[in-house]
Amino acid sequence: MRRYGKNTDEDDIRQRPNRKGNRPRTNIRPKHEEAVEGMVLTVDRGRLTCLVEDRVVMAIKARELGRKAAVVGDRVAIIGDLSGDKDTLARIVRIEPRTSVLRRTADDDDPYERVVVANADQLAIVTALADPEPRPRLIDRCLVAAYDGGLDPLLVLTKSDLAPPDELLEMYGDLGVPYVVTSREELENGTAVERVRKQLDGKITAFVGHSGVGKTTLVNALVSLERRRSTGIVNAVTGRGRHTTTSARAIPLPDDSGWVVDTPGVRSFGLHHVDPSRVIKAFPDLEPGTANCPRACSHDEPDCALDAWVAEGHADPARLYSLRRLLSTRERKEGD
C-alpha cells in the first residue's frame, strides 16, 4: 500500500484509469430544448401513457427528475421516440408548473400527501342519493380539497329515482355549488348526459366519489364507446361498491369538448395537507373579514374577526356556518 508524506503534490497522486471511457459526472443538466410537450393520460407501474399532439406515447420518468412524480393531467416535456409505435418508449424530462392540484392523504394524521390529478379545472363530486346512502362528510372533505387545490366544485347526484335530492341540496345551498341531478332512466335515454356535459364543456373535470355511486357509469355515458371502462355493483350486505377503477385515467369528450378524469373510488379523504387560508379564498364575501383575525387563526375560535364581520351585515351568517363546517371536517371522520 502506498503511503504519502505530509508534503505531497499532484504528481504523487495515483489516478485510476477510466476504463469505460465515459465522461465524468457533472451537476449541469441538459435543458432539453428539443423536448415536445405532452399530457399524462394514465400512470401504471412506472409507465406513463401520454398524449403528444394526436399520438399516444408510452414514456418513463427520467432519472434527473429524482423523486418528482408525474400524475394524470400533468403537462410534461418528452424526448426520445415519439412515434407512438408498439414497443417504443420515450422519456419525460420535465414536469411543467401546475395550475391546480387535487391532493389527499390516507388519513388526517398521515403527513404523506398523494396528488390525484393535476391541472384540472373542476372537481365533480359524484354522490348517490341511495344504494349506497350519501355521506355528507365525504362531500365536505372533497369540497375542501377542491377549494384548497384551486378547482371549482360540481355536485353530481345520481340515482334520484331511488330517493329525492331535496335534503342534500338544501345542505349545500348556501355554498352556491352548481349541481346536476340524474336518474338511471335519464342516463339510459341521454337527457341526464346532456345536462352533465354542459357543465363539462371546455374544461378538464376530475370525477371523484366512493365506490358504487355510479361514477364510472356516468363517465362511460359521457365518452365514446371504445373508451369506456368496466363497472361493478353495490354489495347487498355491506352497502358498499366494489372497486372496478384501479387507476386514474384522463379521457377526452367527443368533439374535443373537454376532458374527464375517472379516479378510483375512495373510502377516505384525508385533509392533513389543507391550509385554512387557502380554503377561505373560495368565500370571497368572507375573505375581507379575515384582515383583523389573529395570526394563524383557524376561523373557528373566540377571537376570529369573521363573527364581527358577519354581525355588521357584510355577509350571510349561513355562509360563515358553511365555511366553519367545512374547515371542521379535519376533526371529523367521514362516517360521523
Image (cartoon, helix red, strand yellow):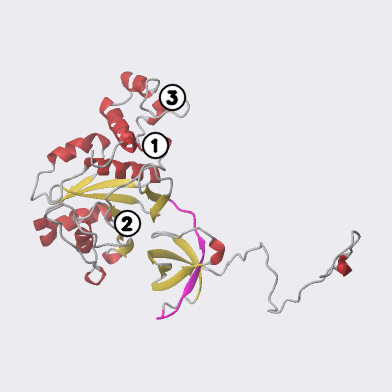
From the viewer's perspective, tell me whether residue 98 is left or right of residue 139: right
Query: What residue appears at the point 85 percent right and 66 percent down from the top-left corner?
Result: 3
The residue nearer to you, when weighing 284 against 219, is 219
Would you identify the image quadrant in which residue 134 lies? top left
Q: Earlier in the sequence, mark 1 or mark 2?
A: 2
Q: Residues within 10 Å of mark 3 (few under 14, many from 20)?
A: some
Residue type at the position of mark 2: Gly
Main secondary structure of the magenta stretch: loop
Q: Earlier in the sequence, mark 1 or mark 3?
A: 1
Can residue 100 be seen by looking at this rendering?
Answer: no
Query: What residue appears at the point 26 percent right and 65 percent down from the top-left corner?
Result: 254
From the viewer's perspective, tell me whether residue 48 is left or right of residue 136: right
Can residue 149 be seen by looking at this rendering?
Answer: yes
Q: Residues within 10 Å of mark 2 (few under 14, many from 20)?
A: some
- Between the C-alphas of marks 1 and 2, the distance is 24 Å
Range of residues picked out in magenta: 85-100
The image quadrant where one finds the N terminus is bottom right
- Between the C-alphas of marks 3 and 2, the distance is 38 Å
Q: Is residue 97 above or below residue 3?
A: above
The image quadrant where one finds the C terminus is top left
* Residue 94 part of the magenta-drawn span: yes
Q: Earlier in the sequence, mark 3 or mark 2?
A: 2
Where in the figure is residue 115, as x and y percent of width and height? Answer: 40, 53
Location of mark 1 (residue): 281
Residue type at the position of mark 1: Lys
Residue 202 numbered mark, or none: 2
From the viewer's perspective, tell me whether residue 4 is left or right of residue 114: right
| Mark 3 element type | loop
* Residue 248 part of the magenta-drawn span: no
Query: What residue appears at the point 69 percent right and 73 percent down from the top-left corner?
Result: 23
